[in-house]
Image (spheres, rainbow, N blue to C red):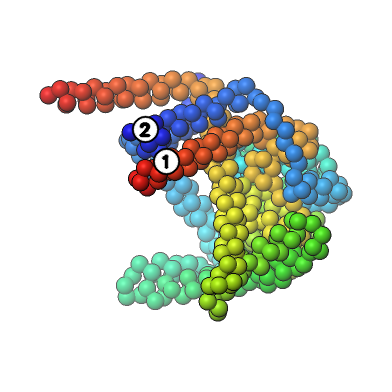
């Protein structure tokens, strides 16, 4: 049995263990759940330490003293766990939040604001364009709170809410498609040899558990 | 208790039906028509129109083989390789390099193209949007070595890169905020064209950018990869999984209708 075969069998076992929650909560599922969290966390910790050393500590020790500042700030973020010095820990977090906001604001106006307004300036020559403009206008109107939403205004905002619901429906269906792909992908993995050999084993285990559970109920009721 | 009540209270029979519907097309492939959307066509046309000496940056976190992003990455990588454009790959997460190597192997990239001349892998760089901003402004201030530790300044493909304007386009394979980050840092300040190759759930956000002309194309989840595979005439994982996806969606519509009927029935009986 080579490494690839062992890898496929482990992969198949983990997929089946994850799917076992669909039958009922069980120790195998819990083991897999914890295994996933543990591996993901371990991976991030190792990569984080590796990157901090290679991109921060090593160049700083080689003479790039400017890197000492982010290293100190990074270490200071752990002071969040100290009651006495947690105010110091807020400094790097504030800087990160401010930097993130400043960088993301760069494209905010041009892409998300002006760009979207420009995209709405379309000729009313087809139904798609008309529907886009009416839908966008009424959906924005729904969030206009300076006028009480009753009477004609109430009717318009109700239609705006319908458009919002349609958009959310589209989002939900796209999410469903994504989850569906994940399930199909997992099943596709299971169908690959030799992983598919685990399927009858899993089915047999579920069947045995179902029979034992039923018998348990029968014995308890007969007593 | 009616059968509708039973189904709504214990969905396990529905899981079994879903599994059967899902597995059947994987064992017996069914050829359903896959029309090409404007989103995918935009992506394909852009790469098709690129000149061989132009450079493209492919970045993101394509995961395992049967996920959504990996088949997309595979299709785009194949198209770029056929066109002979210079491919620079930036892995979007610590585990991505493993899958990048798997993609190279699957497409026989090392046999077809020369590493360091036609393509290169930068590996994973932490820092999120701040790193992206730095990379766009001054390439060498952020990255000096490739994934294997080779100096980028000594590689033909990267030796003359100064900033993001030395790339003809950036294609982001993601399901997270990275798609917006590249728009903020590459498209908004430098005007470098950006394409989005996304998880299906993320597409609704990006459609507004496509309509506004901020991105040149979108690959929409599994369906998008199936479309792209057809466009490059290389049916792969995406196309093979589309039959299952279509049938499962029909089942979901049926289940939704069934749920609505159950709800109405309960309402008429005064139980809802």
Spatial CA span between label 2 and label 1: 10 Å
Q: Are marks 2 and 1 on the same chain?
A: yes
Q: Position of residue B118 (x, y in %)?
A: 79, 45
Between B268 and A114, the one lying in front of the other is B268
Q: Position of residue A135 (x, y in %)?
A: 66, 62
Between A179 and A52, the one lying in front of the other is A179
Between A61 and B119, the one lying in front of the other is B119
Question: Pointer 2 and pointer 1: residues touching (CB < 8 Å)?
Answer: yes
Q: Is residue B164 something one can see in this rendering?
A: no
Compared with residue B78, is residue B22 higher up or lower down, i.e. above or below?
above
| Dot 1: element | helix
Instruction: Give me the residue at 71% from left, 64% from top.
Output: A133
Instruction: Report the residue marked by disc 1.
Output: B265
Q: Position of residue A36 (x, y in %)?
A: 43, 42
Label 2 crowding class (10 Å Cα cut-off): few <14, some 14-19, many 20+?
few
Instruction: Give me the residue at 74% from left, 56% from top.
Output: A128
Label 1 crowding class (10 Å Cα cut-off): few <14, some 14-19, many 20+?
some
Between A11 and A47, the one lying in front of the other is A11
Instruction: Give me the residue at 64% from left, 31% from top.
Output: B243
Q: Is residue A212 something one can see in this rendering?
A: yes
| Left/right of residue B103 with respect to residue A176 in the rendered view | right
Q: In which quadrant of the rendered view does residue B184 lie?
A: bottom right
| Dot 2: element | loop
- Marks 2 and 1: which is nearer the front? 1
Instruction: Report the residue marked by disc 2.
Output: B2
């Amino acid at each position: 049995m080579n490494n690839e075969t062992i890898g496929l069998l482990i992969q198949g076992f983990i997929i089946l263990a994850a799917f076992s929650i669909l039958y009922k909560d069980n120790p195998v599922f819990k083991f897999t759940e914890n295994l996933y969290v543990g591996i993901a966390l371990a991976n991030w910790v190792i990569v984080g330490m590796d990157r901090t050393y290679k991109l921060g500590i090593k160049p700083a020790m080689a003479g790039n003293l400017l890197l000492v500042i982010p290293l100190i700030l990074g270490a200071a973020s752990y002071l969040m766990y100290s009651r006495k010095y947690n105010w110091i820990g807020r400094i790097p977090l504030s800087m990160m939040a401010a930097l993130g906001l400043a960088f993301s604001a760069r494209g905010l106006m041009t892409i998300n604001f002006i760009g979207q307004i420009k995209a709405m300036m379309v000729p009313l020559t087809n139904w798609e364009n008309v529907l886009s403009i009416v839908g966008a206008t009424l959906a924005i109107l729904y969030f206009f709170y300076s006028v009480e939403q009753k009477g004609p205004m109430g009717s318009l905002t109700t239609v705006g809410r319908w458009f919002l619901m349609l958009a959310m429906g589209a989002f939900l269906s796209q999410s469903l498609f994504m989850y569906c792909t994940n399930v199909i992908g997992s099943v596709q993995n299971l169908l690959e040899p030799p992983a598919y050999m685990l399927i009858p084993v899993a089915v047999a285990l579920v069947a045995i558990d179902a029979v034992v559970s039923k018998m348990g109920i029968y014995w308890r009721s007969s007593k | 208790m009616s059968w509708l009540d039973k189904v709504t209270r214990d969905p396990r029979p529905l899981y079994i039906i879903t599994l059967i519907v899902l597995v059947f097309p994987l064992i017996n492939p069914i050829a359903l028509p896959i029309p090409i959307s404007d989103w995918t066509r935009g992506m394909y046309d852009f790469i098709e129109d690129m000149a061989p000496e132009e450079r493209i940056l492919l970045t993101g976190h394509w995961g395992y083989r049967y996920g959504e992003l990996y088949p997309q990455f595979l299709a785009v990588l194949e198209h770029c390789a056929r066109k002979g454009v210079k491919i620079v790959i930036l892995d979007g997460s610590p585990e991505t390099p493993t899958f990048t190597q798997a993609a190279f192997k699957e497409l026989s990239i090392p046999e077809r193209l020369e590493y360091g001349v036609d393509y290169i892998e930068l590996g994973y760089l932490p820092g999120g949007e701040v790193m992206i901003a730095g990379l766009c402004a001054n390439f060498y201030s952020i990255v000096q070595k490739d994934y294997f530790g080779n100096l980028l300044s000594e590689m033909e493909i990267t030796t003359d890169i100064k900033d993001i304007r030395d790339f003809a386009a950036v294609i982001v394979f993601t399901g997270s905020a990275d798609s917006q980050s590249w728009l903020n840092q590459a498209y908004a300040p430098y005007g470098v064209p950006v394409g989005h190759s996304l998880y299906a759930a993320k597409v609704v956000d990006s459609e507004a950018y496509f309509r506004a002309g901020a991105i040149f194309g979108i690959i929409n989840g599994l369906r998008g990869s199936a479309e792209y595979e057809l466009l490059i005439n290389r049916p792969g994982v995406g196309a093979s999984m589309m039959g299952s996806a279509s049938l499962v969606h029909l089942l979901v519509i049926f289940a939704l209708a069934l749920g609505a009927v159950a709800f109405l029935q309960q309402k008429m009986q005064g139980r809802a």
